[in-house]
Amino acid sequence: MKGLSEKRSGPLGGVAAGVALVLVAVLAGIAAQRVADGGPATTEVAAAVTPTGSTTTVKVSIVEMRYQPSVISVPAGDRLVIELTNSDQRRHDLVLATGQKTGPVGAGAEVTLDAGVIGGAVDGWCSLPGHRQAGMTLTITTTGSGAQAAADHAQHGSSAEGHGEHDAAPRSIDTMAAPSADFRARDAALPAASGERVHRHVLRVKEVEVEIAPNVRQVMWTYNGTAPGPVLRGKVGDVFEIELHNDGSVDHGVDFHAGALAPDGPMRPIEPGESLTYRFTATKAGIWMYHCSTMPMMLHIANGMYGAVIVDPPDLPAVDREYVLVQSELYLGGDQAKMRAENPDAMAFNGYAAQYAHRPLTAKAGERVRFWLLDVGPNRSGAFHVVGAQFDRVYAEGAYRLQPDDPGGSQVLPLAPAEGGFVETVFPEAGHYPFVSHAMVDAERGARGIVEVTG
């Protein structure tokens, strides 16, 4: 193997070999379990073999969230030195199940990690949130030792899911439970458009603990402390100038679908303490998603880093009330296995499961009400429906599908992840009108609310 130093093997024999095999299996299992539990790691696996006195040096590069090579083969008993170069554009690290770790390695930086004497298979991974689950793993294997199979079995017996993640305690969400008496739902009313043609906003990445359902709190990654982030609004031709400040603990970025420009600069991830300016012109109308552009995007979006930009269509008619509802998925503990399975713990409009079922939106009979809808996913589609109402104006993804003078009507606005639009209706009489995602499993998970209409 290129880059390996010369080595001298000294195979164990007889009873000593059998004892070493058992020790490797047991100690490797202990090391993996301690790391999985978040307790102190151990390097005791190094003592399970007779050191050869030789050193194996391997060069490893990080490219596009992968270790290259991702498998390292080392003669049993050799000391392993890893020369790690971060050729990615983001900060990473390398943590070994035996306890050694590099600490954060910035883009373009090089570090050396002494992995100690290798007596069996050892797992390695990036400990930044979501990186291990996204595939940033490395495996060290051994040659020339009968202990390898037992060590492999012991070392790989622990799950790769959940390590390094925040708040992974098993819990559940009861979307039928009522919030506390002092709970205040997010104001869904859309502010009127301003007459400004240049919109300057500051977005600060904040990690905050928020309530996402009755009696359930979770640390979320947010823009300006809320999930969704602030709703921005303008007209075609307006300029948006966004200052992004990363006040979090890991790298984050932002991608505005409302702008068309090369993503290389403004959408790049920035480290904690850094900032950038993102400037774009709104050339097309619609309700557009913005979200964190950092990989794995699924985790960053699901954990709260999303929002809406509304660019009014030209000559948009006035209405009596306007609401904006952002549909999203909630995953307890940032569980990426559930994300990949599209099995959320709850669904929400505007970041809290079923909040408008307990704090209804309001309207008056005969008023024209416009509902702006955006599905931010990250995975599941939406199907917005208001029970007891019919839509006579429907706008989706930049085009009108229905106008009040048309003879037909509409019962649902279907939206794939990242799609958006609006519907309008006139409530015929006083009453309570439920609204749901008509994917019933998601309505039961919390994608529901009520419009309370008075006479």
Image: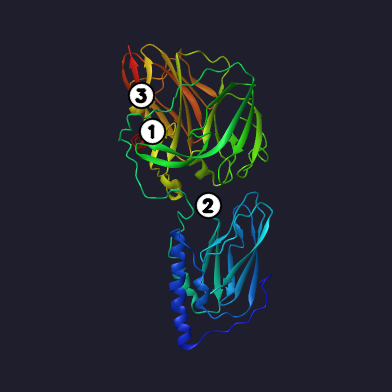
Q: Residue at x 34, y 17 (%)?
A: 453
Kind of residue indicated by mark 2: Ala
Q: Residues within 10 Å of mark 2 (few under 14, many from 20)?
A: some
Which numbered mark, 3 or 2, is in the foreground of this view?
Answer: 3
Q: Which mark is residue 86?
A: none
The mark tally for this picture is 3
| Residue 330 shown left or right of residue 262 in the figure | left
Q: CA distance from mark 2 to mark 1?
A: 28 Å
| Residue occupied by mark 1 | 447
Q: CA distance from mark 3 to mark 2?
A: 39 Å
Residue that sits furthest to the bottom in the current view: 14
| Residue occupied by mark 3 | 360
Q: CA distance from mark 1 to mark 3?
A: 13 Å
Kind of residue indicated by mark 1: Ala
Q: Tag 1 or tag 2, which sits nearer the N-term?
A: 2
Above or below for 432 versus 330: above
Tell me the quarter of the picture where residue 349 sits.
top left
| Residue occupied by mark 2 | 134
